[in-house]
Amino acid sequence: MGFTRAELDSYRDRTVPDLLPDPLRLLFVGINPGLWTAATGAHFARPGNRFYPALHRAGITDTRIDAAAGYDPADLAQLTGRGIGISNVCPRATARADELTREELREGARRLDRLVREHHPAVVAVLGITAYREAFERPGAATGRQDAPWPGTALFVAPNPSGLNAHSSLDDLAHAYAEIARAAGVLPGR
């Protein structure tokens, strides 16, 4: 499945529904949906995004999910059956995360706060340190475990899996996501 630039542009500013299984053990939070994600309705769908390869390498999924054409029911079941949900700080689809405004990011933090208080995941993992710093007004934050504002929910910040993030390798992502999954009880502890 492929899209022309014009087809992808037609999905600008659309939203993608959150993936919120019940029970929700681990909520991965991207920055915002890309245009490919908006076109397919599947989170982290753009070919070259390292989210699903990192989940598989970490042992979180049994197979490597390919969401480029949307979710296959068996792949979706791997996520929801483990209590893994996916949301975004900002719901608006853009070609690049740097198209978001500071106010959109801060409103996204308030939106995420409401979502977490309603669904009570064991762990929230925000994928993107720069967006986390801006959205949550934590300019000095580093990746790893954070002080969580939600009783009973742990908060982590991990590298963004976008192919545009050259600072983190697939192994770095897998290591960070495995640590987060262990904290959520999705993977057995060490």
Image: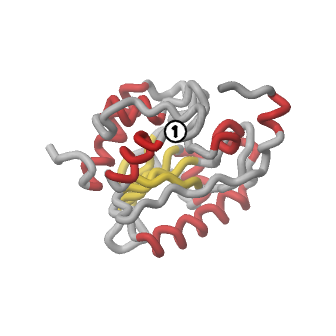
Say which of 149 and 20 sits in front. 20
Say which residue appears at 76% left-offset and 44% top-offset: 99
**In screen coordinates, is 147 left or right of 59?**
right
**In screen coordinates, is 24 left or right of 182?**
right
Q: How many labels, in total? A: 1
Instruction: Point out residue 2 in the picture as x, y percentages from the top left corner.
Output: 69, 25
Q: Quadrant of the C terminus?
A: top left
Is residue 11 depicted above or below 148 in this figure? Answer: above
Colouring of the image: secondary structure
Mark 1 lies on a secondary structure that is: loop
Say which of 7 and 187 sits in front. 7
Mark 1, Cα crowd under 10 Å, few <14 / some 14-19 / many 20+, is many
Say which residue appears at 60% left-offset and 69% top-offset: 110
Which amino acid lies under the numbered mark 1 shown in the image of this protein? Answer: Asn
Picture quadrant where residue 70 is located: top right
Q: Which residue is mark 1?
A: 160
Q: Quadrant of the N terminus?
A: top right
Instruction: Point out residue 105 in the picture as x, y percentages from the top left corner.
Output: 66, 57
Say which of 127 and 188 sits in front. 188
Picture quadrant where residue 74 is located: top left
**In screen coordinates, is 9 left or right of 59?**
right
Say which residue appears at 27% left-offset and 50% top-offset: 186
Instruction: Point out residue 67 in the picture as x, y percentages from the top left corner.
Output: 53, 35
Say which residue appears at 77% left-offset and 35% top-offset: 8
